[in-house]
Amino acid sequence: DDGSEHATWILHYALRMARHLDPPRVQVLHVPNGGASLPAVHRARQESFAERLGVELVFRDLPATPDVAAALSDHVRPGAEDVVLVGFRAHRHGRGLALGTVGHALLERHDHAVLAMRVVEPGNLGLPRVAALGLSESPGLVERLAPAAQLLAPDLEELWLLHVTEVQRRFLGALSYPRLRELERHGLETLERCEATLRRTVELPPRVERCTDVAEAWPTQLVMDAHRAHAHLLLLGASDHLLPRRFSLSNPLEAVLRNAACDVAVFRAASPGA
């Protein structure tokens, strides 16, 4: 928690999800900026909200350091037992919404389970009723996303499974109708397998929908599909391809964060043996 409004919105997510855990507990790690700790009124407001949800809220001030990501990582247990919730930038910046943030730095590490978020709908108060999962044929993606889906599932009324087959522009316009239908069938079959895998470990909401598309750029189409589903949250799995190494408007993550009308979360599970 850096004391910003965006950090407070992310804390709402943490508290909502934690109330389904045993024990229901959230630890707020604060690295002072310029030597300033969180104001007492700020902490009191958060403690009051946590108390209403029945969640134990613990504050911990860490020593000031320029490397906030390393400081946080050093004070979190390695492995999959804890999930670290952090933020991307709330507003556009010269280097984009993800690159250079604490969320980006922690996602690049593989020693903790990390859920990095950008909140654009604070009115949800961390309680999305409709969520969308961006899925693909990437081996093990569903299993890696399952812990994050499990945290969100108890409060969901709808879950949309989204898949986009990317086709280069020069070929897209020349696709025959049979070939287009074949790609769509393949996408639906992928989503059916993903749903079956997800159901083995996650109790899904009553309504689960599948949507597949064929498009030139999957980030743009995925955002459009999430919008059409009226999703409050779009969940993605982190990968080396998704995370930007340098700022580029064409980076998939930057494109999704920039264009999504709903909250966006990116999850990376801890590596085995971490």
Image (tube, grey):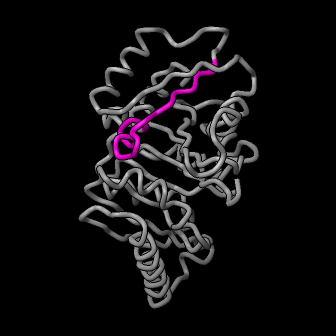
Say which of 203 and 214 sits in front: 203
In the rendered image, which quarter is residue 72 located in? top right
Say which of 51 and 186 sits in front: 51
Q: Which residue corresponds to the image point at 31% horizontal and 37% vertical from the top-left?
A: 124
| Figure check: 49 above or below 141 | above
Give the percent coordinates (x, y) of residue 238: 61, 55
| Figure check: 91 above or below 249 | above
Say which of 189 and 43 sits in front: 43
Is residue 20 rendered magenta in the image? yes
Q: Residue pushed farthest front?
A: 23
Give the percent coordinates (x, y) of residue 187: 47, 78
Q: Which residue corresponds to the image point at 43% horizontal and 16% vertical from the top-left?
A: 43
Could one spot residue 120 in this view of the protein? no
Give the percent coordinates (x, y) of residue 32: 63, 15
Is 166 left, or right, of 25 in this rendering?
right
Could one spot residue 215 in this view of the protein? yes
Q: Residue pushed farthest bottom?
A: 178
Is residue 33 rendered magenta in the image? no
Q: Which residues are magenta?
A: 14-31
Give the percent coordinates (x, y) of residue 28: 52, 27
Figure quadrant of the N terminus: top right
Is 156 left, or right, of 137 in this rendering?
left
In the rendered image, which quarter is residue 63 located in? top right
